[in-house]
Amino acid sequence: MNWFYDPHIKNAYADQFNFGVQHELNSTTTITANYVGSLTHRANVGGMYNTALTPSPAANPQSRALFPYMIASFYDRSVGFADYHAFQLAMNKRFSNGLAYQVAYTYSKALDENDGFFGAEGKNVADPYNPRASLSPAGYDLPHILTVNANYELPVGQGKRYSTGNHAVDYVIGGWQTNGILTVRSGQRYSVTDGEDQANTGNTGWAGYEQANLVGDPNAGSCPNGAHVHTAGCWFNTSAFAKPARGSFGNLRPDPFQGQRYWNVDFSVFRQFPLWSERRRLEFRAEAFNLFNTVIFAPPNSDINSQSNFGVVNSTANSNRIMQFGLKFIY
């Protein structure tokens, strides 16, 4: 395969704009609301060019190419467009009385025509001569994102609300702090594609340019194997999709569907033990990532030609729980 780029290719640029208001609830707590927008112009659009100008069931797509005497080649142009709009709401409490926290929520929409360098996020234009026809949710579009993090110093030990009155015991049980981070977000975007050159344009079918036809409700019913939808063995109703007719593009746009909603909790406990001087301390940390060992499914196999695996989830979007302990001497 040959790979070229437009000799007149230009640098991409973005117009960014935002507006926000902030209100102080008390001396340590603020609430902020922001609108954030970004319009990207001249983004890279890759893919196969000198393919047939239009889909057709005619046998030889090369005869319908812009330059029939040349083979189809990978080609990159700076003609792409993307936009992002978001509403962001955050509450932030600075550390006081042993507690600090932040709650942040983002509602957003991201659209593009092609995800990065030759579909780096798994999305390619169906018609390279009309990339705007593939404008759809970006592979990185996550409409809802909620994060909550907090740091809490336990009110135990010498000089705290709860004290044993014994310096040795207070030294051991006092000064402990906890950290927690909760993340909840929408699932990852994915397309249902036909991994063949069903449009018969001479494009590479394995690139996933051809979308399937939607002919039913993918969230209702069950798979032929009897499994219910939104399970690992049947994430969507496979009978809701069909191959496009030979010589046509599918009626779906890229990335219309979302995988399983993602959520995760990380948690840590730590303590600094002062030694024989203020400069020398011993710090102990215990940390757990994916504290509850939650399993989040990755997007399913979505090539309609994969008869045995179509609609089946074969991997996860997160890792198993990891626990680690650390001891650090600070001097």
Image (spheres, grey):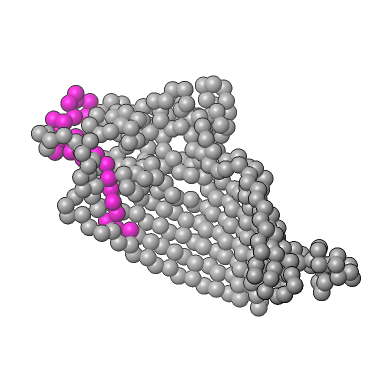
In percent of width and height, residue 215 lies at 42, 30
Quarter of the figure with residue 270:
bottom right
In the displayed structure, does residue 259 sit left or right of residue 101?
left
Is residue 214 in sight in this rendering? Answer: no
Residue at 17% x, 26% y is: 60
Image: 243 above or below 296: above
Residue at 51% x, 32% y is: 314
Quarter of the image with the N terminus is: top left
Residue 72 belongs to magenta span: no
In percent of width and height, residue 84 lies at 40, 57
Residue at 49% x, 42% y is: 258
In percent of width and height, residue 92 lies at 61, 68
In the displayed structure, does residue 151 sit left or right of residue 3?
right
Quarter of the image with the C terminus is: bottom right
Residue at 53% x, 48% y is: 186
Is residue 75 in sight in this rendering? Answer: yes
